[in-house]
Image: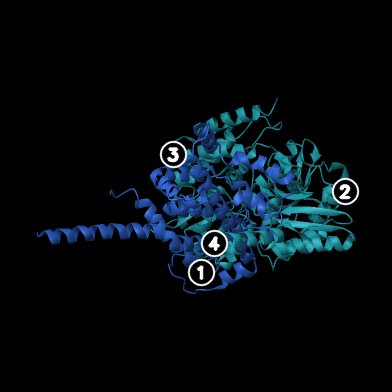
Amino acid sequence: MSPTKQRTIRMAAVYVGLTIGAIVVLFPFFWMIVTAFKQPGQAFTPEIFPSNPTLENFKRVLTDYGFARYFVNSVIVATTAALFATIFATFAGYVFAKKRFAGRDRVFGFLLLSLMIPGMMYVVPQFAIINKLGWMNTYQAMIVPHLANVFGLFLMRQYMMTIPSELLEAAKIDGAGEWKAFMTIMVPLSVPIIATLFLLTFQFHWNNFLWQLIVTNVERLYTVPVGLALFRSQHEQSYTLIMAGSCISVLPIAAIFFFAQRYFIEGMTMGAVKG
Amino acid sequence: MRRLILLFAAVLVAALAAGGCGGGEREGASLTIWQTYNDEENPVFKEIVAQFEESHPGVTIEVVRLPFAGAEPKIMTALTTNTEPDIARVDVSFLAKLATKNALYDITAHVPAEFQAEILPVALQSCVLNGSLWGLPDQTNGLCLFYNRELFRRAGLDPDRSPVTWDELIEYGKKLTDADEGVFGIGVRNSLWWSLPFFYTYGAELLSDDGTRCLLASEKGIEAFQLKVDLHQKHRIEGGAWRAGGIQNDLGFQNGRYAMIMNGPWAVKTLENAGIDFGVGLIPAGPEGSRTNVGGNNLVVFRNAKNPELAVEFLMFVASAETQAMWADRLGQVPINVGALDTIDAEKHPYLPVFVEQMQTATARPQTQYYPEIENLMNPEMQAALDGTKSVKAALESAVAEIDKLLAGELE
């Protein structure tokens, strides 16, 4: 067998394997979209494509259930929180990575310890604080408590440590001030990790059911995860409606990933190729 | 870049201002209610609230609708900061927990004895703890036997008659099961609440009277659970619905895989929408007759409510015969006021009379704040027994040993 033929067979095998993997991974999304178009009660019938497709589920979800409102709330909360959390983490990561000050590593270690505390432990104390501040039923209650993101700080610091300090020194020699050096050297080189952190934080807030439920008492402030939960009553769930709601809820994350994927992939492969 | 950030900041401030405003001072008495009604019940409840506000001028009621899944943590968190509402709708097991933690208002003195006598006994019992009344029911339900009439016809069985005893059920099951086709006579769920009908029909009790011991490992309990296990192991009429990865009983029933399942009144609408030709019968009788478990929800008043008497009035309004008659008529649920029982329109809600009849022989769940933990201890053992990895006796006995330890911690 000629080398070219061998290669072709090997490539074919790889493609087949990857296609099967892709189908397995994408099937739940496919099922979600298809079910959203099915008639109520037909969610689990054996047919793959609905014989009687309907837009009724989407219409009901958006109008009867006020999902449009929940969607807007989630967009506001998730975008703002992700934006500010990323900004703070970037600044802090830069400081911990590139600056020297007394006790720097000890403080960092101490902050890392906080990652070991289960998230649920924060709920009651943070709720008490929110309450004392009079922030119940506000957007800031959903955004502010998670802005100081230690995980983000950790990501940023580790990444920035791999950026050679010589670049910064060179910029300083050329007369760049602190801010200029940061914005023109550190940030452009860290774009992959910044994009990744933005997406992760956005995703966290987009799915943060419990906290958003606890700090809101009025339906006009409910967010997408809380809204989706309203479709489940004690004993049963309306699958077609839930799937329609989920389709809508998946759009922003899919959009962000689609547009920013260049940066994620760049970030992931950055260390892979030498030279 | 900088301009983008400034723009965002401006939008944020605007959004916060819009979101943060709202809510002013209210004049006159007011009540806050947190409820967990589903989409059908919600509009009817809103009507009930409007009726109450009309008959009580000057009273404003604020209703917040919560998803059922998050209601318990939300209420518990609110209690830690004294931001709980006046009234909340809670599941019967949650009421025991709240009452034990002294979060509720004792309404025994505020509800006249004649009114208490109007309430369905099993429903009222779910609100009683340590001799005091802590709330009033707003919904009660219990499992009944649902059967697929089409599959009955095909197997040559009378489509209008469900099996009356467990032996009959086994007989029917054998005729209905066709393992090659993947159709089974029955599908059962594995959880303590869903197994209680089996236990109760044999006369096995869940807890001793003083709530310190679990009695499910008694002879009767073992017999009862053995019957359930045999449905799958011995008679092979059960389709493995309890297994991880098995077809769940609701879905199996909808897809015609299980000819019979246990289910409650909440399932009627979905099945009607799916076009299934089904009937509802009583739970088959064991030595103690036909019995079922009790679930449902209660309305409770919290201890720190500002207007407790007004709140109790609201509870009594919801539980009154007129309101319950409307509730049963609009939603097809079992009314909790016996005065409303004869107003049921059997044509509009053909299955309701069966549920009502079943509730007459339902066994109330003993009130304990540990019910969820008891379930968590029982379920894996029952799973092992259904699997065949443990004998029924061994499984029940080891579960009961753990549960007794748990309950012993209750006595300080």
Question: What mark, if any, has residue A38 been given in the picture?
Answer: 1
Of the pair B11 and B243, the residue shown nearer to us: B11
Kindly identify which chain the residue marked by label 3 belongs to.
B
Kindly identify which chain the residue marked by label 2 belongs to.
B
Of the two numbered discs 2 and 4 in the rendering, the one whose residue sits closer to the viewer? 4
Q: Which residue is mark 4?
A: A249
Say yes or no: labels 2 and 4 on the same chain: no
Q: Is residue B366 visible?
A: yes
Dot 1 falls on a residue whose secondary structure is: loop
Of the pair B186 and A190, the residue shown nearer to us: A190
Q: Decide: marks 2, 1 in contact (CB < 8 A)?
A: no
| Residue at left offset 42%, top offset 42% | A161
State the image quarter where residue A264 is shown.
Answer: bottom left
Question: What mark, if any, has residue B309 been given in the picture?
Answer: 2
Q: Which residue is mark 3?
A: B388
Question: What mark, if any, has residue A3 been given in the picture?
Answer: none
The chain assigned the colour cyan in the figure is B
Q: Residues within 10 Å of mark 4 (few under 14, many from 20)?
A: many
User: Relative to B223, is B140 on the left or the right?
Assistant: right
Say yes or no: labels 1 and 4 on the same chain: yes
For the residues labelled 3 and 1, the Cα–Cα distance comes to: 39 Å
Count the numbered circles shown: 4
For the residues labelled 1 and 4, the Cα–Cα distance comes to: 18 Å
The chain assigned the colour blue in the figure is A
Of the two numbered discs 3 and 1 in the rendering, the one whose residue sits closer to the viewer? 1
Q: Amino acid at mark 2?
A: Glu
Of the two numbered discs 2 and 3 in the rendering, the one whose residue sits closer to the viewer? 2
Of the pair B263 and B218, the residue shown nearer to us: B263
For the residues labelled 4 and 3, the Cα–Cα distance comes to: 43 Å
